[in-house]
Image (cartoon, grey):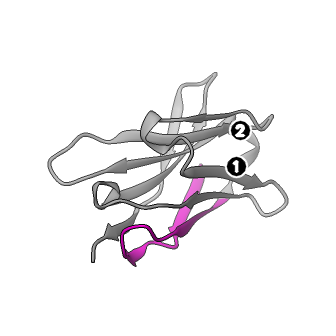
Amino acid sequence: QVQLVESGGGLVQPGGSLRLSCAASGSFFSINVMGWYRQAPGKQRELVASITNAGSTNYADFGKGRFTISRDNAKNTVYLQMNSLKPEDTAVYYCNARNVFKGMDYWGKGTLVTVSS
């Protein structure tokens, strides 16, 4: 089992920045990929960014150039730096941990990001 706890969400004005953190505990050694997803009201959950154990990253088109995913392996923590935030970035952001070979996914409870003036 892997437990994930997100933090860092909140209210920010358009153009502002936030950094989300996801602290992992438990059987973290079994995880191959960490990622951030988001779900806006009335919409499906979508991938924001992901990072492999080797450090390879992947971004949704809407996040390229604005969002940066990173990880601190010593702290079992993954970060999402979000800059130039837009109202359409408003959503609950979820941390995900995946064991690709076993097809297992773990999710945090989410943290709300609201972009509004």
Viewer-closest of 56 and 98: 56
Relative placement, left or right, of 108 versus 91 is right
The answer to the question of whether label 2 and label 1 lie on touching residues, with beta carbons closer than 8 A, is: yes
Range of residues picked out in magenta: 1-24
Q: What's the amino acid at mark 2?
A: Ser
- Local crowd at mark 2 within 10 Å, few (<14), some, or many (≥20)? some
User: Toward which corner of the image does residue 114 lie, by quadrant?
Assistant: bottom left
Residue pictured at 64% horizontal, 21% vertical = 101
User: Where's residue 62, x and y in %?
Assistant: 42, 41
Q: Residue at x 44, y 72 (%)?
A: 9
The residue at the point 18 percent across, 54 percent down is 41
Q: Which quarter of the picture shows residue 51?
A: top right
Residue 17 location in percent, x, y?
Answer: 51, 69
The mark found on residue 27 in the picture is 1
Q: Choose between 10 and 2: the one closer to the eye.
A: 10
Residue type (three-letter) at the residue carrying disc 1: Ser
On whether residue 101 falls in the magenta region, the answer is: no
Vertical placement of 100 versus 17: above or below? above
Q: Which residue extends farthest right?
A: 74
- Image point (47%, 61%), residue name: 84
* Percent x, y of residue 87: 29, 61
Question: Which quarter of the figure has residue 57?
Answer: top right
Residue corresponding to mark 2 = 30
Packing grade of label 1 (10 A; few <14, some 14-19, many >=20) is few
50, 61: nearer the viewer:
61
Q: What mark, if any, has residue 61 been given in the picture?
A: none
Q: Position of residue 82 (x, y in %)?
A: 53, 59
- Name the secondary structure under disc 1: loop
Cα separation, mark 2 vs mark 1, equals 6 Å
Looking at the image, which residue sits at the far top? 101
- Whether 23 is drawn above or below 105: the answer is below
Q: Is residue 47 left or right of residue 86?
A: right
